[in-house]
Image (cartoon, helix red, strand yellow):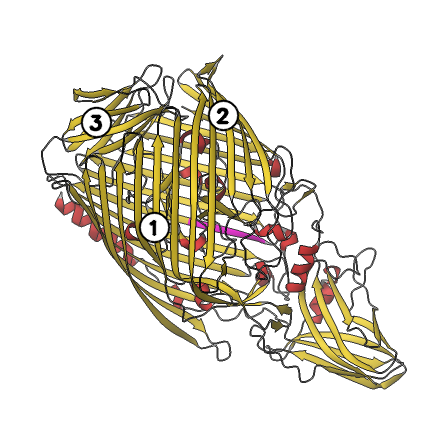
Amino acid sequence: MKKSAIAIISASFILLWSACKKEEKIVDPPAPDNEVITTVRLIAVNAADATDVDTAQWRDLTPNDGNPDLSQANLKLKAGAVYNMSLTFLDETKNPAEDITEEIHERSIYHLICYEPSSGLGITVQRTDYDDNTPKLELGLQAKATTTSAASGTLQVSLHHQPSGKNGTDCAIGSTDAEVTFNVTVE
Amino acid sequence: MAAVLMLLLAHAVVSAQDCAFRITGTVTDDHFHPVTGAVVFLKFDASRGAATDTGGHFTITGICPGHVELVCRAMGFTAVSLHADINGNTPVQIILSAGANQLAQVFIKGRRVTDLRTVSSTELRGLEKFRTAGSSLGEALKSLPGLNAINNGPTISKPVIHGLHSNRVLILNNGVRQEGQQWGSEHAPEIDPFVANEISVVKGAASVRYGADAVGGVVLLNPDPLQEYKGISGNVYLIGQSNGRMGTVSGTLQGRTDSNGLQWRVQGTAKRAGNFRTPGYYLKNTGMEETDFSAQLGYHRKGFSLGAFYSYFHTRNGIFEGSHAGNITDLTAAISRSRPLTESVFSYHIGRSYQTVNHGLAKLSGSYQFANESKIEVTAARQGDLREEYDISLPYTNDPTLLSKPQVSFKLITHSAEVVYHTGTHRRFSTDVGISGNTQGNVFRGIRYLIPNFRTYSGGAFAVERYEKDRLLLEAGLRYDYRWQRVYQRDTRTLDVYNTTLTFANPSGTVGASWHFTDKLQVSGNIGTAWRAPSVNELYIHGVHFSDATYQDGDSTLRAERALNASLTVKYDARKLRGTIDVYRNHIGNYIYETPQAQPVTLLSGTFPAFRFTQDNVVISGLDGALQYDLFSSVTLQSRVTLVRGYNKTADDWLIYMPADRYEHGVVFNLHQWHFMDEPYISVENVTVLHQSRAPQGLDYAAPPPGYSLFNAGVGFRSDIGKKQVRFDFTVANITDKPYRDYLDRFRYYADNIGINFIIKTKLSF
């Protein structure tokens, strides 16, 4: 009987050690086809003067560590003008950079982009494009910005994911996929 | 056929041949009312016997050490027998069931519950256990004094012992440490409570016997002993509840090939629920489904016994749509709403976000009782845990394989082994010694990074010494644990894999005493320590934790937590009045928690409050009480109270997420027999939870909710149909359909708790 006890002990230790595959040593690389938003690019074209173009860009190539590159996150607009704005979302961790704007277009029925100028900044922004819902609801990849007088402030641009309850105006619905702030000077 | 249950006791046996031991105990019905005039005697020496007094108590003296078979008979009840290894004065609890063919229950008091006999403990069994059938483990246990539940909506619930939960509470499934992803508040224990007919809870630090992590306590799920007699028996549960239109089916079949043959049991559970309803609206995507099964084999002959056990748990849980937040702006908007924006309809559909969990446990065990009555027990087990979480936001890609993948997945494989040797009792001393070891490999896969892969090796050795004389029990134990952990990560820039190794070594100990002042009054005191190595998320998490919209940063320099817990238990067990009061003070050094950082983190997806794991010295103290008083023979008043105070001594502030004061008062009206019903009862209960006023300021997104008071009522009975038995219970929970929010429910930020709920439970035993 003592032999059986010893047999059980050895069997259990064999079970214990033999079955260890070292799977944990293989660390998955970042998912190859996953697209992360690294860059939000805002292009503003003066509706009355196609040569008056400014581009602002908010970029963070290491999207998880909280060190964005804000050197180009500045937009300069003329007072008393109307600008057509278009928004591009990029994944610049890929080479060449992946344009995520297309996927937002494809899933436009549950996305909404919101523009929020800081108070005192003489600017109003209106979405000009629509999604594929019936009836069509606002989307916001295209917008019209109307400036009044010279001032400086910020413009917050946010991309909302609204799988249920999208009404084309309410930004509080759903969850936020992107929320960036540009410095804006109107002169 | 008489129900015979045998207990394979995890304690020592003797060589000393002086027949001077006593078996003391109580005999009750399954409402825990004492049974007067029951006869308890040794099967092969009927002269050694006693009858119970009016309190159901009995004492048999002159018991020799070694194996005994004890028989208990009482008018109107099925006779039961109990096998026990006697190595000292042995307390026994016998629970009888009326009628011809019911499974009665027999317990060796204090022993089967826990291997540490002076630490405070509590059990869920008998009728009380039946009345929690169909609930998750956390929900089932929260009615016990000293326990609460931390919830993530109506289906995800985990037990809280003395204010502590998750990695600080150890769960033992059939003697094996449950190893899953216990670190998140939304990671419920991967266990089917139907696997055990009895659940015991050790309240307080208990690392000496159970190893690391037993800082708050230990939950032990003990399946009944396998069937001793030849033939087949079983039971089926059918449970339906109105809220969530939830249905549960669970069944057990067990038997033995012949009276010396192989014992077996198979058990399975299936559950399904749809959207739960608060008073006023449905909670979208809160459905769940669960399928579990277990199988067990046993063989014993003379001193030799072998067992095999396998259990499998699978669940898919919807995550309430209104709780999804992309960043702090979303979260504060959701909190400020009086009700969620999501549509309010009933559906069984589970959409994204949801989580799936699979957990398998295989266990082999053997024991041998040597000629000198000492005993060796060997256990080896393998567990696999796979948790996958699917977010509501799909990744920005058109790749269909990526779209169907979980955003994060965790796979944890654990192999463990334990050898325990119980010496005999020599001049009233007995010793348990043991060694245990385990190794774990964790593989994280995800579309986004959360925690790294790791491998751990842990080993420990312990010894527990006991001295028992008449009314006195002394207990002391020592343990040493060592843990090696290597973490594998990928550098985010160079993509090279690198590793970091950490080691932890900790002694732990316990001393305790228990004194029976009279047969009715027992006082126990214990001082014990426990420790816990920082978990991988506390060390290395880096990124957004979506469920609470925070940016979390681990700290790889964290040290192990160490708890020093002192507890005092007074038990009074008389005919009319029965009660237990526990008081405790748990000092935890290097307690790990998240502390807010001054600067929020700006990511492309918005601004997130930043938290970093840090450690401080904290004290958690409290009082648990349970009292039953028989006003008349058919009317019992019962009260339970759970009070917890948690304080951070380093920061000089209250601890966050400590349970608010909880009081339960009830009246049970019951009869012995009424028409075809055996032991019918009607119960009315009030549960009052106070406002948590002792919470730190400014650390939480929303202030603790106001207190609430709920009423529950139930009726039930048992009935015998030939050789079969039916048990029935009908309960209405939250009768007044009161809207309320609980401080320990993470959903309190977004929605009310569930409203009125009608629950029917039936159990057929055959």
In this view of the protein, can residue B197 be seen by the observer? no
Q: Position of residue B352 (x, y in %)?
A: 61, 53
**Image position of B715 with respect to B427: above or below:** above
Q: Nearer the viewer, mark 1 or mark 2?
A: 1
Circles 1 and 3: CB atoms closer than 8 Å? no
Query: Which numbered disc, 3 or 2, marks the residue that appears first in the sequence?
Result: 3
Q: Residues within 10 Å of mark 1 (few under 14, many from 20)?
A: many
Quadrant housing residue A151: bottom right
Residue range of the region highlighted in magenta in the rendering: B354-359
The answer to whether residue B123 is left or right of residue B334 is left
Q: Secondary structure at mark 1?
A: strand
Near-viewer residue (B452 or B671): B671
- Please name the residue that numbered disc 3 is placed on: B69
- Please name the residue that numbered disc 1 is placed on: B566
State yes or no: residue B251 in magenta.
no
Q: Identify the amino acid type marked 2.
A: Val
Q: Secondary structure at mark 2?
A: strand
